[in-house]
Image (tube, rainbow, N blue to C red):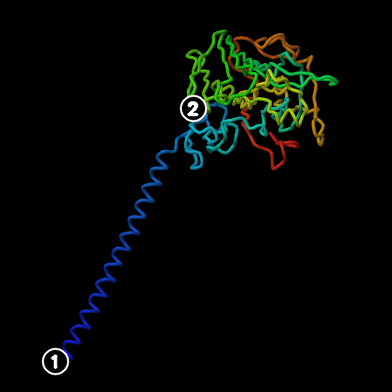
């Protein structure tokens, strides 16, 4: 009798163990299934949030092809100033969406930063000092003209001015647009130091990320990247300009011995240009570097290769196209039919070199 009870207890005990193991196995399988469902739903949601971009350059192999943005930058805009956004390089033979930063990349092609240091369309670094309180043509093409106003100072004993770009003046068709860094005695990040005008009228752009203004006539758009002091100016199928306003800091002053006075922090622009339809005849301090056969006079291997051209590219005002080498034709809203239409993006060809010195990129 006792043996029978022992057998029953043994069977009951093992049955409980077996039932428990089966229950745990079922639970484990259910957990795996739930995890897989969550993963699939999340991936589907991320994919659904990815936007499409399209190239509208008719001469591009990617013309009107819908391209899905990569996971790294799923959208074309972002409220975060440092976030990458999606775009398509219409000049690339490979049709794919790529990522870029919206703020100027001072070490990328088409950049003009510091005092002023340029990186040409050929990827070569050079300096053009110009002259304080004067204007020079950065780009001049048949349908687009961009000037820069230089500000600066000349400390005692110096043979030339220290200069920075304070404003841009843009001419296209019969329209004009200007963008300026406003003067400030001391720098305050909480204050916006940008002002704009379109066809002579002041443009009011509310503060805040993604705040935009658009011209109903030309579709020119100004969009804030951050709440203050950073914008992107775009003219569809012509140019995109990333702009940032910065001051001369005390550290800059100490390192370079600018001898900045206490009543002016020399707020100036950092800019980077991206073009969509330059002709081979394009001119300007920076524009000439986009010519297919241009030979850059900047000496390779020199720490600060300085190039000239002040007399060739000097204009009488911020919104004047009257320089010796200027190509701009008012009301010519499209490039010549014979022109080779090219897109030049915001490439980063630094290759690890400090400040971009020695950059050489092939077109």
Residue, x 52% and y 15% (percent of image)? Answer: 218
User: On the rendered image, what quadrant is the C terminus found in?
Assistant: top right
Query: How far apart in space, not on screen, are marks 2 and 1 (Cα)?
Result: 85 Å
- Label tally: 2
Mark 2 crowdedness (10 Å alpha carbons): few <14, some 14-19, many ≥20 = some
Farthest-out residue, left: 1
Q: Which of marks 2 and 1 is nearer the N terminus?
A: 1
Is 33 rendered above or below residue 346?
Answer: below
Residue 352: x and y, percent? Answer: 69, 43
Residue 287 appears left or right of 12: right
Mark 2, residue position: 209
Mark 1, residue position: 1
Residue 188 appears left or right of 151: left
Question: Is there CB contact under 8 Å for labels 2 and 1?
Answer: no
Residue, x 76% and y 18% (percent of image)? Answer: 153
The circle drawn on residue 223 is none
């Amino acid at each position: 009798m006792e043996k029978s009870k022992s057998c029953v207890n043994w069977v009951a005990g093992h049955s409980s163990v077996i039932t428990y193991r089966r229950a745990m196995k079922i639970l484990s399988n259910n957990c795996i299934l739930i995890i897989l469902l969550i993963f699939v739903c999340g991936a589907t949601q991320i994919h659904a949030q990815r936007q499409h971009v399209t190239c509208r350059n008719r001469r591009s192999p990617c013309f009107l092809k819908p391209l899905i943005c990569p996971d790294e930058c799923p959208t074309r805009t972002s409220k975060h100033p440092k976030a990458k956004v999606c775009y398509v390089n219409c000049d690339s033979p490979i049709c794919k969406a790529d990522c870029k930063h919206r703020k100027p990349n001072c070490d990328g092609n088409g950049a003009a930063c510091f005092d002023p240091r340029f990186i040409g369309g050929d990827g070569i670094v050079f300096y053009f000092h110009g002259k304080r309180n004067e204007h020079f043509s950065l780009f001049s093409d048949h349908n687009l003209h961009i000037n820069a106003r230089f500000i600066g100072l000349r400390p005692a004993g110096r043979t030339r001015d220290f200069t920075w770009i304070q404003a841009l003046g843009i001419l296209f068709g019969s329209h004009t647009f200007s963008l300026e860094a406003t003067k400030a005695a001391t720098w305050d990040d909480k204050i916006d130091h940008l002002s704009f005008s379109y066809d002579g009228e002041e443009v009011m752009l509310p503060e805040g990320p993604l705040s935009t203004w658009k011209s109903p006539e030309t579709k020119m758009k100004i969009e804030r990247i951050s709440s203050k002091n950073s914008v992107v100016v775009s003219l569809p199928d012509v140019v995109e300009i990333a702009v940032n306003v910065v001051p001369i800091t005390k550290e800059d002053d100490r390192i370079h011995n600018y001898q900045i006075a206490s009543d002016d922090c020399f707020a100036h622009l950092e800019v980077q240009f991206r073009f969509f339809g330059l002709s081979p005849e394009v001119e300007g301090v920076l524009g000439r570097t986009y010519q297919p056969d241009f030979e850059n006079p900047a000496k390779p291997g020199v720490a600060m290769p300085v190039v000239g051209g002040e007399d060739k590219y000097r204009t009488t005002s911020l919104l004047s196209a009257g320089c010796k080498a200027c190509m701009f034709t008012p009301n010519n809203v499209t490039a010549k039919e014979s022109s080779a239409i090219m897109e030049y993006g915001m490439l980063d060809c630094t290759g690890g070199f400090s400040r971009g010195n020695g950059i050489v990129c092939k077109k």
